[in-house]
Image: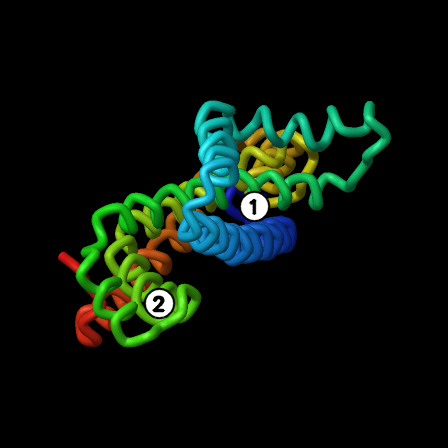
Amino acid sequence: MNQWGIIWAARESFFNGLLSTLELFIIAAVVGLLIGVLLCYVMEYQNRFINRLIIAFVSLMRAVPFLILAYLLYYGLPQLGISMEAWTAGLLSLVIYHGAYFFEILRSQRRIFSAGYIEAAVSQGFSRYKIFRRIVLPNIFSSALPLMGNQLIICLKDTAFLCIITVQEITAAANSVQSTYFIPFNAFIVAIALYWGISILLELLIKRLSHYGAKRGMTHA
């Protein structure tokens, strides 16, 4: 059997790795984005103590390499009596890490959001929640889409690190095939193709959302 024949015979391993990667990525992206939105909303209340805690959390996540965080949750927490499966630890590390970055992206857009929109909404009697939900969030989210797209791709690529803590995703599948059959080039070419395919789909999705936002006038540029 030639090398590509071996890859085809191992297709189930790659398929299962792809499903695991997609599951991790989609859950982490959705929950991480929700965390980013929630933190951004909390910042609207201008509570100095809480805001400092949020900024400290974000600063910590920006300073800590993602792999170190995954190691800490999977290998470090058991020393404190907190154990979790590799998949759960990997997902939690993705959510915490990228939630901080999603918040930072939204916060950067919030800081340049025109105060005139807020003043107009306040004059109309809008509550703080309604202002954020109907005016602030749609506009800052739309303007942040290119940055969000980049962060989503980074989140996708970070799933590859989780093979170090035994999560069976795409990279783990490729590594298993190459170590069993000694065909690293073919195995990792397939892994690259899978990551690339997902990234292209993400780019297309972001473009669609950007066009939709532009048509709806969701921009404060």
Regarding residue 187, the answer to whether it shows in the image is no
Q: Position of residue 202 (x, y in %)?
A: 36, 57
Q: Measuring 25% from the left and 71% from the top, which residue is drawn there?
A: 123
82 relative to 65 in the view: left or right: right
Disc on res. 149: none
Q: How many marks?
A: 2
173 relative to 35 in the view: left or right: right
Q: Measuring 70% from the left and 44% from the top, which residue is drawn there?
A: 87
- Residue 114, quarter of picture: bottom left
Q: Measuring 26% from the left and 52% from the top, which residue is drawn there?
A: 146
Disc on res. 95: 1
Q: Position of residue 91 (x, y in %)?
A: 63, 45
In which quadrant is the N terminus drawn?
top right
Q: Report the amino acid beneath label 2.
A: Ile
Of the numbered discs 1 and 2, the one sitting upstream in the chain is 1
Q: Is residue 182 above or below residue 154?
A: above
98 relative to 132 in the view: left or right: right
* Circle 2 Cα neighbour tier, 10 Å, few/some/many (<14 / 14–19 / ≥20): some
In which quadrant is the C terminus drawn?
bottom left
Instruction: Give the secondary structure at mark 1.
Output: helix
Q: Which residue is mark 2?
A: 131
* Circle 1 Cα neighbour tier, 10 Å, few/some/many (<14 / 14–19 / ≥20): many
